[in-house]
Amino acid sequence: MTMEQILPPLVGGILIGLASLGMMFFNGRIAGISGIFRGGLLPEAGETLWRWVFVGGLVAGGVVMMFVKPTVFPTTFVSKWPVYVVAGLLVGFGTRLGSGCTSGHGICGISRFSARSIVATLTFITTGAITVFLMKMIGGAS
């Protein structure tokens, strides 16, 4: 592997770790995106602004990246839009069922040695691998 291949994921991982650490240190909160988003939709007093600023920062990062390196975004989609809608609903259901998402469990939970988060992350990864395998077997994805 070249440094050009190693550097972007390394820097990205460091930034995610620092952002998660900052969220815990300065806000006393776990940087679980689904929980932050849900709390923005079902707000408690004094809990709304920081949640929407956080979500806005995620969206803004994607928009900036679209201008900086547009080649990382697909210009055509493999499936039709209903497939993406169903997939999004299934992800949302799974996030609710698992009491969190990959960012909350996989990044913050595992770093805190949470047994629940380790099991949840292993479940996410296993389910994803099985889904990819099945989709390749039935010809739904390449």
Image: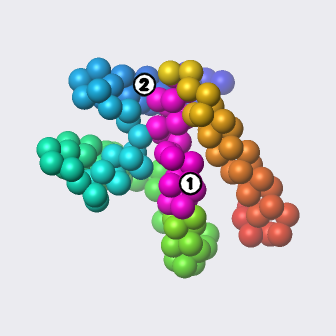
Q: Residue at x 51, y 65 (%)?
A: 88
Vertical placement of 51 versus 137: above or below?
Answer: above
- Judged from the image, the secondary structure of the residue bearing numbered disc 1 is helix
Q: Residue at x 52, y 36 (%)?
A: 105
> Can you tell which of label 1 and label 2 is closer to the viewer?
1
Is 110 in the magenta?
yes
Is 124 in the magenta?
no
Q: Is residue 54 visible?
A: yes
Give the amino acid at mark 1: Leu
Asked whether 91 or 69 is in front, the reply is 91
- Judged from the image, the secondary structure of the residue bearing numbered disc 2 is helix
Vertical placement of 90 versus 51: above or below?
Answer: below
Horizontal and vertical percent position of residue 38: 35, 54
Which quadrant is the N terminus positioned in?
A: top right
Give the amino acid at mark 2: Gly
Q: Is residue 60 visible?
A: no
Q: Is residue 4 left or right of residue 23?
A: right
Q: Residue at x 60, y 34 (%)?
A: 116
Which quadrant is the C terminus positioned in?
A: bottom right
Q: Write the start and end of the magenta stretch as one range.
A: 91-111
Which of disc 2 and disc 1 is earlier in sequence? 2
Circle 2 residue: 17
Q: Is residue 63 left or right of residue 141?
A: left
Asked whether 70 or 49 is in front, the reply is 49
Circle 1 residue: 97
